[in-house]
Image: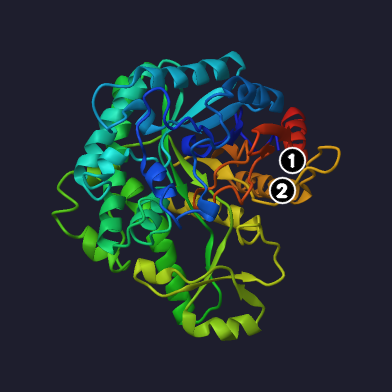
Amino acid sequence: MANKLPDGFLWGVATSAYQIEGAVREDGRGASVWDTFSHTPGKTFNGDTGDVATDHYHRLEQDLDLMAELGITAYRFSIAWPRIQPAGSGRPNAPGLAFYERLVDGLLARSIAPVATLYHWDLPQALEDRGGWPNRETALRFADYAAVTARRLGDRVAYWITHNEPWVAAWLGYADGLFAPGHTDLREAAAAQHHMLLSHGLAVEAIRSEAAKSDAQIGIALNLHDVTPASDEDADVAAADWVYGQQAASFLEPLFAGHYPDGVEPMSSTWADPELVRPGDLEVIGRPIDFLGVNYYHPRFVASPDHLVDLVHEGFVQTAPDHSHSFGFDFVELAHAEAARTEMGWPVEPDGLTRLLLRLRAEYPKVPVIVTENGAAFADRPDASGRVADPRRVAYLEGHIGALTDAAGQGVDVRGYFVWSLLDNFEWSSGYSKRFGLVYVDFPTGRRRPKDSYRWYREFIASGG
């Protein structure tokens, strides 16, 4: 492994603000769309909210010590926009900035590199009330927020990520309605995607202008999959091409090639509207970045609904209810029947990460990659002695780190790997029913218990792989 990965390779863990912080009404924090959404009956499992989450806001020192003991070299966290600008604009909230200063300083004191994500889906509710991401103004306000944050933390933070999984925020939030703010409008989702990408480019400019570190590394984290047709039938190939185009190419192409892809209808027609994509927008979106963050969890086997019965007979199973109508194209997602699956229903196939990274290298050869999220949810619980044995998570991580190393050995410029997640947390619409953490959290009490996977990752890092 030492021969395949570069010097300074980042071994880390990742979290996000709304999923762990709690303290949603403290120290001047404003409401976010997820505060509103999670308090709307029927939107989350068991009515769960992030009001307390893992109480990271009050247990910061304890969690920093857990990271230090783990031996990671980097920690990826997100900054809550409504903690910095409670109304989404205007004078920054001093206690909010002070919390992230304590976090960054605590990381540096433990020789852990801070990797700051500006946006992980917690849009200030005040901006949503003015139209949210479908409103172009939100992109401008995001640039202001990026400037404020970089000005305050940019002397200590060397790695910045503008957005986490903008596909999820745009399409599950504005087209499918599964995530906040819960809208179901295709044109809103397409506009949200464009304005998030535009805000990314504006934030790149703001960070480069305001951060005191001249060598700051800036990127964006996309949720990407190895997308494969379930058969060589034309309809299945077309479905896989559409899915990759809608979820991956429609972000990668504007970022690295200066245009939106054709043939991803009805979105391509929306992006052709000059009232939405204005002169100069694509140049801003395509501002040079230093790395592409890849959030990878599982492959996607895609087929036309017309072939579902035949493919089931050939050894596939459908992995999830069909929500494809929300995106304007009919397809189904499958998995090999014999494949292991996580509590999310996602197939475990590490080779998919290798295939994805090789595809990215072939299509965008000049862009370094950091695997900014990779992990699995399993329902492991403490035994009578308090031990949390999670062998399936250990096997998942071992397999995917091996897949990453295989890709590096084939020439992929990969510079870091972050496990999702440090802690069991609020898992969005799934509430507290899905556990991704290396550390078990007892949610009524907040007690932390490192799992066997935590100890495995600690030994792995310490041994150099």
Residue located 66% across and 57% down the image: 342
- Is 116 drawn above or below residue 279 in the view shown? above
Classify residue 389 as left or right of residue 184. Answer: right
Q: Position of residue 175 (x, y in %)?
A: 34, 61
> Split into 4 quadrants, where in the image is the N terminus?
top right
**Circles 1 and 2 in contact, beta carbons < 8 Å:** yes
* Labels 1 and 2: the sequence-earlier one: 2
Q: Position of residue 174 (x, y in %)?
A: 33, 56
Q: Residues within 10 Å of mark 2 (few under 14, many from 20)?
A: many
Q: Name the residue tied to disc 1.
A: 453
Classify residue 453 as left or right of residue 188. Answer: right
Q: Position of residue 103 (x, y in %)?
A: 51, 21
- Residue 194, can we see it? yes
Element at badge 2? helix
Classify residue 95 as left or right of residue 105. Answer: left
Q: Position of residue 228 (x, y in %)?
A: 53, 67
Q: Choose between 285 and 430: the one closer to the eye.
A: 430
Q: Name the residue tied to disc 2.
A: 393
- Is 452 drawn above or below residue 331 in the view shown? above
Residue located 26% across and 29% down the image: 144
Question: Which of the 4 image quadrants contains residue 347?
Answer: bottom right
Three-letter code for the amino acid on which mark 2 is drawn: Arg
- Is 176 drawn above or below residue 235 in the view shown? above
Marker count (numbered): 2
- Is 442 drawn above or below residue 272 in the view shown? above
Question: Which of the 4 image quadrants contains residue 71?
Answer: top right
